[in-house]
Amino acid sequence: MNANSYDNLLKSKSRLVLLLFLLLNGSLAFYALLNPLQTNPPYTLPGIAVLCLSVLCGGIFFFQKNGYILKLNISALILGILWAAHISIKFAHVQSNEHTFLLLNLFSIFFIGMIALSDHFLAFCLYALPSSLAALYLNDLHNISRIIFIVVLPLVAFSVNLMMGRRLEHFTRRLVTRLEQDRERYNDLSMQDPLTGLLNRRGLEEKFSEFKTTDTDHSPHFVVMIDIDHFKSFNDRYGHQLGDRTLVVISSVIRDALRGRDLAVRYGGEEFLLVLRDASETLAVQLCEHIRQHVEKMTTDNDIPCRITLSAGLAPLRRHNLEEAITRADEALYLSKQRGRNIVSLAT
Ligand SMILES: Nc1nc2c(ncn2[C@@H]2O[C@H](COP(=O)(O)OP(=O)(O)OP(=O)(O)O)[C@@H](O)[C@H]2O)c(=O)[nH]1
């Protein structure tokens, strides 16, 4: 669930409202044909138009994907005018109980409006206004208090409902955005090594699978394994805390040396893995050498009490086969250790 899916939810709600509105109007028009309130004439042209329009628009809008609110407002206005015309034509032939006839018709219109358009104030007004005005005009303002009561009561309920709905929507939208941000933050944190801030193994998996799907060119990539030399003795001599500090400093040297597109991972305790993207062999070796020399030259400026070195092994990444490249880089790293450490070796 994210802000986008929340918007989609609101969109599908508007679609349902539009279809429900047309269904209710079509049903009322159909019922009025079968069982007219006033049988002379049994049906009117606007009444038939309401039925045909509701069925036709319902069928068309069912398959459309956008613009539901605009369609709802336009449908509300057209159907509202047609109902007003229907009421006026029928009223001309009413012999008795004119007031009841008008009130019952108005009641039907407001009933549909309240059910289908309770979240759409403009559509409700466009729909209900023509019949209300027609009823006031036809009634010579006789029953004005009743008609106003029928009109005003829903409007008050509407305003309260709308206000609550808006607040709820605002709150939900903020909540969804906040949850989405938190999810991203926790996702980032779960991919990060807390000590060094580099990616952890989960981060490597995630970023590497992204890289695999977006990598379209066939430039060479390299995988590098880096291991701090004699780190056990360092820890034993200077303590774990200083060992941790050294890991942090070396991590920042690595981070500074890499380009934005490369990946730096704390792969094990004192072991780092790099994925160098779009890098030639020369560039990959140069980058590793730069890191090695920088660490070697680190002095007490970095609070490191003695000279510390690291060894590295690198191997080309072929066909996105990370496991194979790691194995080969590991072998090259082993070679560097065997050759006396503080060396960068390329897999043969
Ligand atoms: N301070 C600190 N030490 C760590 C951490 N993770 C691993 N280590 C230490 O790193 C040392 C790794 O030692 P070894 O694997 O024996 O290797 P080494 O002493 O570096 O020797 P070579 O790799 O052969 O040069 C161990 O003593 C671990 O305790 C950490 O997060 N902080």
Image (cartoon, rainbow, N blue to C red):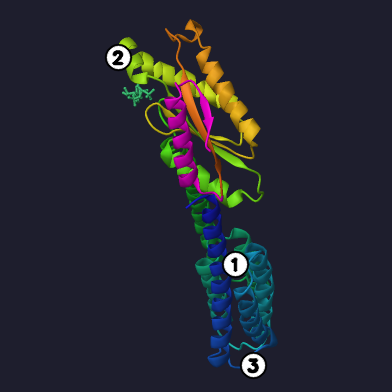
Query: Magenta residues?
Result: 319-348
Secondary element type, mark 2: helix
Q: Position of residue 346 (x, y in %)?
A: 54, 33
Where ligand 1 lies, by quadrant? top left
- In the rendered image of this protein, does residue 125 appear above or below residue 297? below
Q: Which mark is residue 236?
A: 2
Relative to 136, say whether 315 is above or below.
Answer: above
Q: CA distance from mark 2 to mark 3?
A: 104 Å
**Which is nearer the eye, 29 or 8?**
8
Marks 3/1: CA distance? Answer: 26 Å
Camera-side residue of 255 and 293: 293
* CA neighbours of label 2 inside 10 A, class few (<14), some (14 to 19), many (20+): few
The residue identified by callout 3 is 41
Which x, y percent locates residue 149?
53, 64
Say which residue appears at 66% left-offset and 88% top-offset.
44
Residue at 51 percent across and 61 percent down: it is 153
Left or right of 133? Residue 191 is left
Which residue is depicted at the point 52% across and 54% down? Answer: 6
